[in-house]
Amino acid sequence: MIRWRYAATAASLLALGLSACATTGTNAPAKSTQASAKPAEKAEIKPLPKGLDGQASSGFPSTYKPLPSRPTAFVGATVLTATGQQIENGVVIASGGKIVAVGGPDTPIPADVLKVDATGKWITPGVIDAHSHLGVYPSPGVSARSDGNEATDPNTAQVWAEHSVWPQDPGFNRARAGGVTTLQILPGSANLFGGRSVTLKNVPSLTTQGMKFPDAPYGLKMACGENPKRVYGGRGRSPSTAMGNVFGYRKAWIDAADYARKWDDYRAKQQKGEKADPPKRDLQMETLAGVLKGEILVQNHCYRADEEATMIDIAKEFGYKITMFHHAIESYKIAPLLAKEGICSATWASWTGFKMESLDGIDANAAILWKNGACVVIHSDDAIMTQRLNQEAAIAMAAGAKLGVDIPRAEAIKWITANPAKAMGISDKTGSLEAGKAADLVVWSRDPFSVYAQAEKVFIDGALVYDRKDARFQPKSDFELGQPGQGAFN
Amino acid sequence: MIRSLLLASAACALAFPAAAQTVAIVNARIEPVSSAAIPNGTLVIKDGKIAALGAKVTVPAGAKVIDAKGGVVTPGFIAPSSNLGAAEVNGVRETRDDGTGSALSAAFDISYGINPASTFLGLARDGGITSSAVTPILTGTGGGAHEHADDGVVEEMTAGKSGDGDPPLFGGQAAFIRLKAGAPDIVEASKLAVTVSLGESGARAAGGSRGADLVLIRSALEDARAFAARRAAFEQGATRDFGLSRLDLQALVPVVQGKTPLLIRVSRAADIRQALKLAAEEKIKVIFEGVEEGWMVASEIAKAGVPVIVDPQDDLPGSFETLGSRLDNAARLHAAGVAVAINGSRDFNNLRQERLNAGLAVANGLPYSAALAGVTLVPAKIWGQDAKIGSLEVGKLADVVVWNGDPLETTSWPTTVLVGGVEQPKDGRHEQLKARYVASDPGGYPPAYR
């Protein structure tokens, strides 16, 4: 089955998508009640001073602008759409930064688009790494740039990863050469609540705001297991045990629910025109309350199956949703539960044995999850591995084949594209090759599941951002100028 | 399928692998490494050794026939420098025997801590690895090039035990193991090399700077020479004071005599030049590991005839001594005439990466034959094992892997692994976990009963 849509349809879908996505990204959340009915009665109500109303504060808006592009048709490649299809001799047409058509060889190509012969190549959506510390733990890894863990308190929900990102990290350039077009940058896992993640378009930029994925929801990094209890237990404070971890989560959610209630009460009174004293804005509580309201996605570092089950119960106790478990190397043990709860598992293909909670890591984790209908994401957490997530997915796919679980490439490609997009709340914008979505795509030298495959051309919003054969499209970080590594691509 | 796998696992768990028998691998593309590939041939193993290989070899009567089904047969891969068998969980110090504290330096002998029952030997075999050089690291320097600190939380993932103080100057003495399941002793050779670091970690061991590191290393070698020359006087307390203990000096004697190599971990081009100078002036044999900036001084390394162990994934300026890291480092070194061995990971738990790293090097310009040699014959030569293993030649030990496809490809895996002609079990701990959980839940009893 080959599906493709006309540009007109695409445009209307896109419009719908944008209007429907008033998330917690850079815009004010949709739930604000201030703009609703009875304007006359509210004339006396003054808005809170700048910075005191978390909902009104737009905070660090994205300044991302797509790079220049021209309408292009890629013709003749094997296309993995990440919607479940593998199209031979396919056609992908991008215009205005969007995909406008995807189909077989009979797909009509408008006369005014640039035709690119991609015979023998493979085309996939841009790779999305749902777990990256590029920028917050950049290269070189020196202590002056170690900005990923605010390891001063088990709850630092108030910190935002985007304030630690060093946009000149050469790792962004290497990742792009591996086909990575979108990244979720997370705080580290020293804390129960590590802080907010940020989703970035992998474009060179002087500022983090210039990379910020427009209208992507925020994530909250949480961590189970050994790291928080070791970091804080080692300092003689809570948590020092797994049960101490769970206490820490529950206490914070109680505080957050209370905080959210105070604001709700205030806004309700305000709306009725009653006099009300606003609660004081608390950045830590604001992020946690955002989770309780469903506006911020929970990204939960959690290795062990039993701890995942505990986290699911905590989420139910307080009425929030866990979007994804990260480093979820034991998810295979509770695959049916994760499928039922609709929680994604982000995993490496086969890393194992580097700590006690990783001891049961097996290369069939992804395959067993997939067999059970659970959502699989292959992530990196590593500046080296992020450059080859395609191969990491291949290893996980092959491990399935070895066990008799045959996973088509058209499915496995979702692990590094459509599924991370879904888990990052941006699947209406990128992650698959469908009309209306961003033209974030990779032209591979061959089957991307091969060890020999290389990303030849990488496009973000239709713009060429990397070309393996053209030095003009091999951007270098300021740090790399004059260093021996500056010729790393040629 | 699952049930039979389980039954097979159960059977294997009870029995040691069968003794070496006559085996014929047929219908295979044979990659001997030391000679041209045989597109469709047969390989015969007798008494644990390779007895014949070629396109027109007949299968001996009574031989166990393994049909490769058009797959590929290679020599067992060799991990050129790892901690396999000397560590079980990176983050659990009690299981780490791949480094030592300040009580010993060059004398530390990793071979004594090798555990033939490590559950990771089987995992390594799943990556086609049948032997490994096991090399000590400096205390406090972590697991290796790709030591994994999840989410930037740096655990005490290091060799040596707590309270060991500063790392010693030398890491200790390396060993070589063959991954024979069920064997009481898998150490093939010990005291094969002494390890040392230049650059940032060497500087740390020496108190803070490169200059101190090199002065101390040179001084130690000088002491070892004096110690060897005046052994009797030393025993009588009639020599000057030496900077190292008797045991450490003794371990360095074969190094200064040129019998045993010094394995030097070095990254920066300038440090590599210092290492070459050290080797030339001290007239010692050396092996380089790391060499991220090796491509910048490739012809000098080639001229000195120093073999290198590289990780082809290294392409980030991860530190100020690896600013020149490039994906084509292996290719450029090889092109300059350097013998290049390919490392997957130093870590016992990720050796499956080795064959993929060889593939990555090919994608970045290394000839396929050189990549295959980089995981077989080159490391065998580096560690002095090439008379026994490293290539498929008549008379060599039958450490042989049958693959269902290109051994460097992501989608291939070993279908049969033989060590010394003995077929190795496929029921390692990780395989048993898989078998337990790939099965659909029949309801009722929990997985612990499966």
Image (spheres, helix red, strand yellow):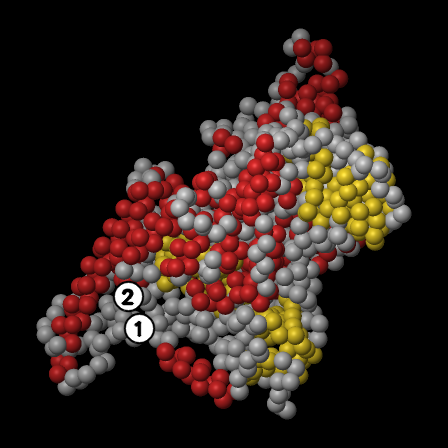
> Residue drawn at (71%, 28%), measured in percent from left and top?
B189
> Residue drawn at (57%, 41%), measured in percent from left and top?
B7
**Marks 2, 1 in one chain:** yes
Subunit under mark 2 = A
Q: Are marks 2 and 1 in contact (CB under 8 Å)?
A: yes
Where is residue B258, by image quadrant? top right
Q: In which quadrant is the N terminus of chain A drawn?
A: bottom right
Where is residue A253, by image quadrant? bottom left
> Does residue B376 appear in this view?
no
Residues B308 and A18: in front is: A18
Residues A95 and B202: in front is: A95
Up the image or down, A3 lies above or below B128; here it is below
> Residue drawn at (56%, 48%), measured in percent from left and top?
B2
Q: Position of residue A41 (x, y in %)?
A: 12, 83
Q: Secondary structure at mark 2?
A: loop
> Residue drawn at (71%, 52%), measured in percent from left and top?
B404
Up the image or down, A237 lies above or below A76; here it is above
Residue at numbered disc 1: A29
**At label 2, which amino acid type do we have?**
Lys
Q: Position of residue A122 (x, y in %)?
A: 65, 70
Residue A293 is tagged as 2
Whole-angstrom CA distance, mark 2 to mark 1, is 10 Å
Crowd around label 2: few <14 · some 14–19 · many ≥20 (10 Å)? some
Residues A73 and A211: in front is: A73
Q: Secondary structure at mark 1?
A: loop
Asked if residue B212 lies left or right of residue B58, the reply is: left
Residues B110 and A63: in front is: B110
Crowd around label 1: few <14 · some 14–19 · many ≥20 (10 Å)? some
Q: Position of residue A358 (x, y in %)?
A: 48, 44
